[in-house]
């Protein structure tokens, strides 16, 4: 099967692209390599999972936009836009730096490649940043997704899967969160764009017969994770002896899900093309989480023990846009697709900490 993975230099996409290539699929990964977080981490993932080393002929990028972090000072070897890079280690694995808001570039890629399946992971992620820069969410998550839908309409694919998010459950209080719950009360623009994706996909599934599956991811963690998420933010602070911010005085719980379980579940979902529903539409959404919410304080204790250092904790109020708890009901994905998350938090945190302590950018 020939598969397009967007967001392929990202946390989930880089691992997924590699796993699909390992099982024999032909994979094209695209990513615009945004500087929302340190692009060197993305280039590191391309090296780790695609075997693509930075090339001396690549231009040096300017310093990163000033985000007030130490990382803004760095420069790095930057991947040229639009150039196809073949994995030297994995036949059938390629990477192209491409922005999904670039409608022409995306159309040319689809015309050339004729994909069987598409997995859209490219997005402006993160809840908190959507308060500062909401337009970047509309661009990547709404305009970019629309471009992908148009490409799937013009160059038909067997299945379009895409990342939604647990954050769309917003102000809902009934737990666990189930796909049948009404989701009309988002607490952030990030969540609103992800809900929009589900609506847009439904319209295209209905209008043009494109089979579509949305995956509502629940707080993914593990090696090569995102620096804007709690595990890495906490690990950075704990290692540097700095305070960690514990929101809502620790009274939060998250359905932390280990990256291996997520990648495995995503592969099962890509392979599982939805049948027609009662409306005659081939459309599905699934929760993909662990179904075992963890109290924030327990998560911090596990991390302290794995890193061998105690955290200095700054207990602060709830952040705007955040939700109190996430808890996935994953029974639908289990019964229909065969998903079985199996990594206990203790083991997952150990693997994350081991990677974190040896990681060099
Ligand atoms: N990691 C989680 O816990 C989690 C939870 C819920 C939903 N999700 C969703 O899953 C997807 C993958 O998340 P992730 O954690 O791997 O995030 P990530 O930020 O590591 O990966 C997303 C990638 O998309 C790229 N990108 C952004 N805008 C782009 C554009 N316009 N064109 C091409 N590439 C673009 C970024 O450079 C990045 O590498 C995202 O859609 C995210 O919203 C993730």
Image (cartoon, rainbow, N blue to C red):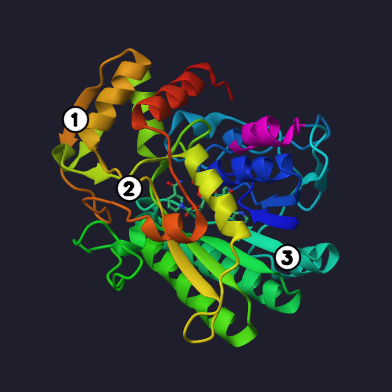
**Apparent side of residue 212 relative to residue 92 in the rendered image (left or right):** left
N-term mark: 2 or 3: 3
Other residues around mark 3 within 10 Å, as few (<14) / some (14–19) / many (≥20): many
Residue 325, above or below 143 = above
**Apparent side of residue 26 relative to residue 228 in the rendered image (left or right):** right
N-term mark: 3 or 1: 3
Frontmost residue, 52 versus 143: 52
Q: Residue at horizontal 28%, vertical 51%?
A: 326
**Label disc, if present, on residue 314 of the rendered structure:** 1
Location of residue 211 (image quadrant): bottom right
- Judging by the rendered image, the residue that carries numbered circle 3 is 106
What's the magenta region? 42-54
Mark 2 beta carbon near ligand 1 (under 8 Å)? no
Frontmost residue, 347 versus 166: 347
- Rounded to the nearest angstrom, the CA distance separating label 2 from label 3 is 36 Å
**Disc nearest the viewer among 3 and 1:** 3
N-term mark: 2 or 1: 2
**Disc nearest the viewer among 2 and 1:** 2
**Label disc, if present, on residue 291 of the rendered structure:** 2
- Rounded to the nearest angstrom, the CA distance separating label 2 from label 1 is 28 Å
| Disc 2 element | loop
Residue 303, above or below 49 = above
**Disc nearest the viewer among 2 and 3:** 2
Other residues around mark 2 within 10 Å, as few (<14) / some (14–19) / many (≥20): many
């Amino acid at each position: 099967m020939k598969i397009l993975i967007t967001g392929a230099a990202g946390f989930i996409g880089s691992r997924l692209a590699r796993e699909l290539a390992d099982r024999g699929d032909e994979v094209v990964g695209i990513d615009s390599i945004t500087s929302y977080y340190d692009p060197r981490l993305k280039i590191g993932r391309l090296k780790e999972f695609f075997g693509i080393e930075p090339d001396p002929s690549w231009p040096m990028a300017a310093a990163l936009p000033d985000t007030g972090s130490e990382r803004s000072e760095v420069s790095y070897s930057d991947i040229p836009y639009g150039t196809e890079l073949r994995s030297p280690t994995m036949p059938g694995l390629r990477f192209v730096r491409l922005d999904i808001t670039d409608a022409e570039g995306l159309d040319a890629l689809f015309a050339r490649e004729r994909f069987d399946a598409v997995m859209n992971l490219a997005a402006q992620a993160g809840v908190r940043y959507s308060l500062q820069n909401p337009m970047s969410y509309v661009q990547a998550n709404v305009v970019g997704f629309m471009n992908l839908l148009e490409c799937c309409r013009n160059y038909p694919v067997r299945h379009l899967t895409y990342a939604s998010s647990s954050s769309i459950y917003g102000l809902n209080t009934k737990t666990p969160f189930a796909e049948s719950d009404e989701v009309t009360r988002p607490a952030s623009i990030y969540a609103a764009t992800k809900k929009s994706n589900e609506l847009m996909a439904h319209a295209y599934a209905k209008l043009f017969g494109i089979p579509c599956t949305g995956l509502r991811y629940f707080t993914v963690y593990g090696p090569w994770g995102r620096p804007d998420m709690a595990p890495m933010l906490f690990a950075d602070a704990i290692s540097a002896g700095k305070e960690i911010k514990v929101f809502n005085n620790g009274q939060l719980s998250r359905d932390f899900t280990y990256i291996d379980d997520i990648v495995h579940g995503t592969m099962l979902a890509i392979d599982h093309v939805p049948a027609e529903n009662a409306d005659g539409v081939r459309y599905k959404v699934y929760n993909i989480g662990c179904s075992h919410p963890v109290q924030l304080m327990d998560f911090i204790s596990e991390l302290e023990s794995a890193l061998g250092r105690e955290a200095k904790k700054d207990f602060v109020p709830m952040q705007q846009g955040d939700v109190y708890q996430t808890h996935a009901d994953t029974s639908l994905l289990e019964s229909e697709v065969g998903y079985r998350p199996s990594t206990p938090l203790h083991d997952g945190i150990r693997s994350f900490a081991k990677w974190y302590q040896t990681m060099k950018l």
